[in-house]
Image (cartoon, grey):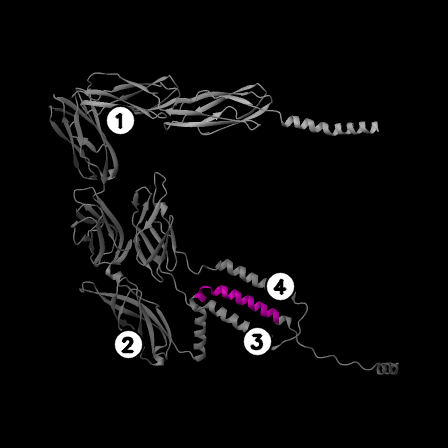
Amino acid sequence: MMKAAQLMILFLLIIAAPVIAELSIITYPVGDAFSVSPGAESIALCQCEPFMDQFVIRNSGRFTSKYMITFSHPELVSLSETSFELLPGETKVVYLFINAPCGDEFSKDVTFRVDDLFGNRFVFEKTLEVGKCQNLEASLSVSQDEPVMPCTPVTYEVLVENTGVFTETYELWFGGERYDEYFDNPYQTLILPPEQSGVANATMTLDCALSGDFAIPFHVAAEQNELAAELSHDLTVLEGYDYFFGATIEDVCAQDVAELPVTIRNDALFSNDFSLWLEAPTFFSLEKRNVTIAADEEEVIMLTAAPGAADAGNHTIGLHAQNTIGGVRKTITADVIVNTCYGVSINVDVQEHIVDCAGYREYPVLVENTGTMEENVTVAVAGSPFASFEQEHLVLGPGQTADLSLVLDIPAENAVETVLQVRASVDGKDVVGEDTIAVSFVDEYACYQPGLAYNEVRLSDQAGEFVLVLANNGLDTTTYDVAFDGPGWLEIDAATDEFWLAPGERANVTMLMYQDESDVLGRYEGSLLVFVESVDDERVLTYVHPFAVRVHGQGFVAKVAERCVGLIAAYPCQFVSVALLALLVAGVVYVLARPQKRRRRSNPLLFGLLGLWLLAVAVFLLVQGLPPALYEPVEASDDPLLVRFAEDTSYELNMSQYFVDPDDDLLSFTVSDVENVFVAVRNDTAVFVPEEDWVGTRRFRITAYDGFGGVTESSRLSLEVVDRVEYTCWSLYSKYCGYVNLVLLLALVFVIWLVAMLEVKEEPPAPKRPLKKRVAKKMKKQ
């Protein structure tokens, strides 16, 4: 029983022991765990000034603890540490860093809160007083602190000291808005650490025309602290050697003389000598180089400009003046534009080469004033005593044109070939426009030259009439009267003895036959007499064209044969075509009408025929050459100013070949309007497309632009569209007749081969006798 009681007590003690220990931990008193020494409650500092403060935290408890610090206004302050552990009795110094902004003045309370792990907290505040503090001291010194003469340089020195506690940037402005232009370095910057000083200096040179008392301002500003200091210096400039120097500069005309006034006024109180000199192109000159001017007097000196035609453009000139007493120099720099005020062009509106009949002729001439002034223009022509202008003197305003007539009165019996040069000049100026044309004038006999298409006629004695073809081979339209000189049984039909023919036109002269068959067979000669009245109607031009008439009396077959022979002789190639075509048709008809079995071996024949055809092709090409082009190329012109191409085609012209830009600028181009021709410009290429079926000659110009205001114009170019042959089916066939025959020959070779492939059916062989009969017959013979 005793043991059981003891065991129970021991069990209870074991269970109760941990309960007693837990109760002892919960009821342990904690108390104040830490203390804080916050330091100064108020901190006064300057704008932009960095500042450091501190406070102390001590663990006054009996246990190790972690401490956390929070605070307001983190944009102004920061801490060296915001979380740390302290052992019992240990202290920690926490540093407070303050960054005062530069812009504002203010007062703010910063709250700090310290917490430990046991729920204890300590709160305290610090007041920050931020204000402006003086950190700028400035002083001014001058190199000449006494009255100065005009144009005398004066050097100023500004001493700046940073009296603050932080690095500051100082902006210095010499002269202010009114006088800073006279300083060599009006804007300067100094960056100074605390308690340091710096120096900025600049030299001022007032305009030589300024004199009197001047208050020169200086401005110094502290950028961060926003403080400023204003300094000033009273400068006296004596009335010394100043003078006025000016000129009236205007644009001038090339090939003209202009006088530009230059004025010098002596503003000093005494007389002074002035020298002038000029930096300009050689066509500028000064009336005087040296002049003496009394006090308060002025003198006008003429600057003369006499530019030539080659001087057009923009020119920069420099006028310099300097007085002897004082040595004050002044300069006038100006741009003078020399304009092309006088210009003239002349153009004969015809082809470059005229072929015409002698006599009275008028050709249109266009004269244009290309300048900007009204001009008296004189026109003249050289190259022939028979050439003149109906009007030689005219007055043209700017851009105005005049239509004149170039008259050529060449005696009808003269033949003249020459080059005419027309010239337009501006009176009193070296301005000339020129154009040239080549002329060929034939005498009146060649002007109306008639001709016969053929001079021998073959006809039957039964013909009754025949035709002579009369053509106008001359250069002008006229009336032809015809007569006949020959056998009496021939005469001209009265209805065909007079013709009005233009150049190149033809007319049929009908000859009537009145004869017996027995009388006229054979060959007879006669002459066709053609009469033309001269230009002045004072004489009659007579042309004699002999011809022969061969009269034969063959029968119908002979006539047909003769006609065929004549046709074959006249058209041998066409005859070959007809023969080949006939053989080809016959072969095709034969092949189609006689279908037979093909032979197996006919290749040698085919190869032989092909060889013969190739031989014929080779011989033909050796004689005739390759097929000619349908249209012969237009003969290129040796004249670079002449563009020649065929009608209904286009032409591309590289326009850059006519221009050279010394600056290698990229040029753009335009082309003047060309009548009857459409012009398209792509980069530096002009494409000319004439109207359909139009032929003729036009003139045009090309204008180049360099993109910087530069413009230039080419010489006048000529565009000639040449007439191109129009083919009919017959003429096209006649042109390529030989090559058509080669194709027909090849087709005929193929047909011959087809005919050779056919064989005639043979009669079937006789049937053989039966075997019994053959044996019996054989036995019988034995």
Q: Residue, x 45% and y 21% (percent of image)?
A: 52
Q: List x then y, in percent, for residue 313.
A: 26, 39
Residue identified by numbered label 1: 176
Instruction: Say what secondary structure mark 1 lies in.
Output: helix
Label 1, label 4: how far apart the Cα atoms are: 111 Å
Label 4 environment density (alpha carbons within 10 Å; few <14, some 14–19, many ≥20): few
Q: Which residue is mark 4?
A: 607
Task: Give the residue pinned by disc 3.
Answer: 589
Where is residue 316, by image quadrant? top left
In percent of width and height, residue 431 lies at 21, 43
The tag earlier along the polypeptide, 1 or 4, is 1
- In what quadrant of the picture does the C terminus appear? bottom right
Residue ID for mark 2: 493
Amino acid residing under circle 3? Val
Q: Quadrant of residue 133?
A: top left
Distance from the alpha carbon under mark 3 to that under mark 1: 118 Å
Could you tell me the amino acid type at mark 2?
A: Asp
Specify which label sits upstream in the sequence, 4 or 2: 2
Dot 3: element: helix
Element marked by disc 4 = helix
Vertical arrangement, residue 169 with respect to residue 455, above or below: above
Q: Callout 4, which amino acid?
A: Phe
**Residue type beneath disc 1:** Gly
